[in-house]
Amino acid sequence: MSQRNPQSYVCGLDAAIDVVGGKWKVLILWTLSEGRKRFGELKRCLDGVSEKMLIQHLRELERDGVVHREVHNVVPPRVEYSLTEYGVALNEALRPLGAWGCEHKTRLETIRNAPEDTPTAV
Amino acid sequence: MSQRNPQSYVCGLDAAIDVVGGKWKVLILWTLSEGRKRFGELKRCLDGVSEKMLIQHLRELERDGVVHREVHNVVPPRVEYSLTEYGVALNEALRPLGAWGCEHKTRLETIRNAPEDTPTAV
DNA sequence: TAAGGTACCTACCGAAAGGTGTGTACAAGG
DNA sequence: CCTTGTACACACCTTTCGGTAGGTACCTTA
């Protein structure tokens, strides 16, 4: 997303947005709140995500300390992802925003699917 | 940002992120929570924003119904921006996220400014 | 022997986001 | 007369984001 130079987070809000600002990140967090999931499971949960983006976002979330990655050294590789305590807290903090989004969901969909230049009979 | 196709917001959270997902949007909302501001004032508050982006983001926030734009037809143009009730609610909903961000601000800054490949003496 | 599943990696490409620099109408101020 | 300030619009350019396609190592199953 709009990754700002991180030397200068202004109010914490921009820092948080920087963490969850990828296309699939909130959905990943949301999905992982149900419990630990394997890579393939996640992929099936997030319909339409490409493997590249899923991995990339998972890595970033891991780097940011909100997602934990656990590798089981077995022969068909088995990797499980889960939320850290930071991740759980982040999910909690996202609740009100999700609620706001739910309230305005249909309104926003309408706005955004509408043509910007309402050509009411030319 | 990562504007998803809005026919399919999954959980409201992605809808909300879509609204506040621009580089300067949360900062605009944050600044406007202090009260109505003119374009130039906003620009001075948000250090480093380009006029183009400020206008673009303001227009989008206006379209999404969270920011109100008021034009006074005077000769040196005077345009004032303020939060709508939706915008106020959105700001409230962003509070916990901002708090989370504040708690993790320095940690995130450290992580993100650090070299990813710690080249400990080559 | 061949195919399939796991969890990735890599190179390449188009689209979107964001920044820069200029122009504009109008009046006030020096 | 020239400059300054307001609130933009527009063209151009670079960077980032996200997606597609292909490949890998290993084992299982047919």
Image (cartoon, coloured by chain):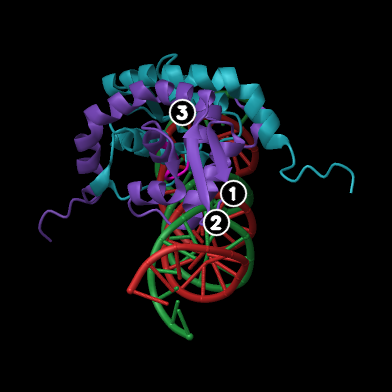
Chain colours: A cyan, B purple, C red, D green
Q: Chain of mark 2?
A: B
Q: Is residue A27 placed above or below C20 in the rendered structure?
A: above
In the image, residue C30 lies at what x, y percent? 33, 74
Q: Are marks 1 and 2 on the same chain?
A: yes
Q: Residue at x 55, y 40 (%)?
A: B69
Real-space CA distance between mark 1 and mark 3, rounded to the nearest whole angstrom: 43 Å
Tell how many labels.
Answer: 3
Judge whether residue B86 is colored magenta: no
Q: Which mark is residue B75?
A: 2
Nearer the camera: disc 3 or disc 2: 2
Subunit ID for the residue under disc 1? B
The residue where tag 1 is placed is B73
Residue A8 on image: x %, y %: 25, 46
* Residue A26 marker: 3
Characterize the local packing of mark 3: few (<14), some (14-19) or many (20 or more) Cα atoms within 10 angstroms.
many
Residue B50, placed above or below residue B23: below
What's the residue at 35%, 51% (across, down)?
B44
Q: Position of residue B45 (x, y in %)?
A: 34, 46
Q: In the image, which is nearer the foreground, mark 1 or mark 3?
A: 1
What's under tag 3, amino acid-wise?
Answer: Val
Task: Give the residue drawn at x 41%, y 30%.
Answer: A77
What element does badge 2 sit on?
loop
Q: Amino acid at mark 2?
A: Val
Res A69 seen here: no
Which span of residues is magenta-colored? B22-26
